[in-house]
Image (spheres, rainbow, N blue to C red):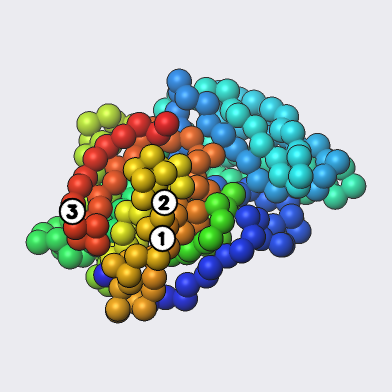
Amino acid sequence: MYPLRALCLLCAVIPVNAFDEFRFASYYGDHMVLQKAPERAVLWGYASDGSKVFVILEGQQGNKKQAAYVQNGMWRLTLDPVNAGGPYNVTAVQQGPAHAQVTLTDVLFGDVWLCGGQSNMAFTLSQVFNASEELSLAPKFPQVRIFMAALEMSDQALTDLPRVEVPWSVPSAELLGGKEFTYFSAVCWLFGRNLYETLGYPVGLVESCWGGTPVEAWSSPRALQKCSLEEQEDNSNYTRPLLGVVWSNSVLWNAMIHPLLNMTIQGAIWYQGESSQWGLLWVEPWL
């Protein structure tokens, strides 16, 4: 179970100050992994209306420049396919009255996976039987990059993550260890490390999970409707006495999954446990 942290029930689809600066969306950053070819990775962020945005991909094979469109204070483009490898620099430039530029460094292309669920997925690498050995191996896998969304709830589907717990990082014993059920998932890390050893090219791991949560809170309204569960929002079984929270339908989908729908990824693994009276680990392509 995660320790109690500040919970934010957000009411706006996009934060009021989202457009105050030219930038990438919250889950882009230095050291990140973008989805390799044949997929075409999506890049997006915030910009001033009326401006022009260009994105330059700088790598060993020269520079590629693409234009992005700006609408309602947001810019977006789809990169041409890029084969696995790197590192690259990705620079976004805003041209217009408010000229600005931001660069992401040490960007790799590979397979990106989302790791979600509750405490079964949140179980930390420091809690496994051979934790010391596993943690000591972390620096040997610099091309397996990790990212972790912060714990948030929302009553509306958000466009971007409200907060980030661990920005894109090269793995270390400190980031993969930590206290119980904090920082990075053991299942997610071991899954990604095995993929890298099998495939031989970069792997990006995106963790978005919260211990003690029911699957209904992670489910979209459409999925709940198909399962005839949309009327169970106030079910008292969703109350967790330790956290003192009633898990309304879709509040975690809205804040911790829906913002990732624009992220181009290879697939997702999900590990749901006792809060829904059953446990399941499955692997799915990102649809």
Considering depth in this image, is 146 or 47 the residue closer to the camera? 47
Please name the residue shown 66% across and 46% down the image.
Answer: 45
Three-letter code, disc 2: Glu
Q: Quadrant of residue 91?
A: top right
- Give the image location of residue 108, x and y in percent: 46, 37
95 relative position to 7: left or right: right
Callout count: 3
- Give the image location of residue 18, x and y in percent: 69, 57
156 relative position to 129: left or right: right
Asked if residue 3 shows in the view, the reply is no
Please name the residue shown 32% across and 70% down the image.
Answer: 236
Asked if residue 285 shows in the view, the reply is yes
Give above or below for 219 relative to 122. Answer: above
Q: Which residue is mark 1?
A: 233
Considering depth in this image, is 21 or 276 the residue closer to the camera? 276
Report if the CB atoms under discs 3 and 1 are less than 8 Å apart.
no
- Give the image location of residue 140, x and y in percent: 27, 48
Three-letter code, disc 1: Glu
Q: Which residue is mark 3?
A: 278
Find the distance from the CA under tag 1 to the CA under tag 2.
7 Å
Q: Quadrant of the N terminus?
A: bottom left
Q: Which residue is mark 2?
A: 230
- Camera-nearest label, 3 or 2: 2
Within-10-Å neighbours for mark 2: few <14, some 14–19, many 20+: some
